[in-house]
Image (tube, rainbow, N blue to C red):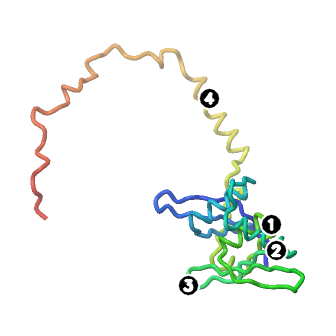
Amino acid sequence: MLLIDLVGIQMNRLTGESVLVLREHDQPNRLLPIVVGSAEAASIAIAVQGQTLPRPMTHDVMATLVEGFDAHLDAVELVDFQDGAFIANLAVSGPTGDLRLDTRPSDAIALAIRLRAPLFVSEGILDAVGTSAPSESASVLDDAQIDAEVDQFRDFLEQLAPDDFVIGADESAVGTVDDEMPDDPPDTDRERDV
């Protein structure tokens, strides 16, 4: 199992879907997007921001139950990806022993954030559906290239003369809107032959 971090919650504006973005903690820092319900995304966002509501949400009650029964959420484990759905387990330890509870990843992550439990994913899931994070070196510009572009621009500026900025007095080259418009607009309602 590999340690992962929750790095963002995004909403797809076209579909309205909420997406959790998880990232592999160590190199190569693969990304794992998980589509979740809007209620679960809101619950996770509230917990990440450290906010509390006047009345407890379901995940707050779950966290209270874990602590109230002297149990501990040891980890959340994303263990499988079947038919387009992620399968997760809660690894819980307590006075009666250790348990692995099957759960939805969104509920597990919402609980993990509240109880400060680590998130793990199987390497097989990252291999199958993880995506490579953009490399930092790809976005870093080469200093030599930047200097060359700046030097080229400076040379261009040095060759400019004040006359290069004077607008010509030849108004005949400039037409008006009326000069360009036809007398009758084209008929746009005609049927076309297909």
Depth check, mark 3 against mark 4: the one in front is 3
Depth check, mark 1 against mark 4: the one in front is 1
Sequence-earlier tag: 3 or 4: 3
Q: Secondary structure at mark 2?
A: strand
* Above or below for 24 versus 189: below
**What is the distance, in whole Å, between disc 1 and disc 3 at their CAs?**
30 Å
Sequence-earlier tag: 2 or 4: 2
Tag shown at residue 73: 2
Sequence-earlier tag: 1 or 3: 3
Whether pointer 2 and pointer 1 mark residues with C-beta atoms closer than 8 Å, the reply is yes
Q: Which residue is mark 4?
A: 155
Circle 2 crowding by C-alpha within 10 Å: few under 14, some 14–19, many from 20: many
Location of the N terminus by quadrant is bottom right
Q: Which residue is mark 3?
A: 83
Circle 3 crowding by C-alpha within 10 Å: few under 14, some 14–19, many from 20: few
Sequence-earlier tag: 3 or 2: 2
Q: Amino acid at mark 4?
A: Asp
What residue lies at 12% left-to-right and 42% top-to-bottom? 186
Q: Can the viewer see residue 28 in this picture?
A: no
Q: Secondary structure at mark 3?
A: loop
Sequence-earlier tag: 1 or 4: 1
What residue lies at 69% left-to-right and 54% top-to-bottom? 53
Q: How far across and how far down the image is residue 137, in percent?
A: 72, 56
Circle 4 crowding by C-alpha within 10 Å: few under 14, some 14–19, many from 20: few
Location of the C terminus by quadrant is bottom left
**What is the distance, in whole Å, between disc 2 and disc 1 at their CAs?**
7 Å
Relative side of 38 to 177, left or right: right
Q: Which residue is mark 1?
A: 115
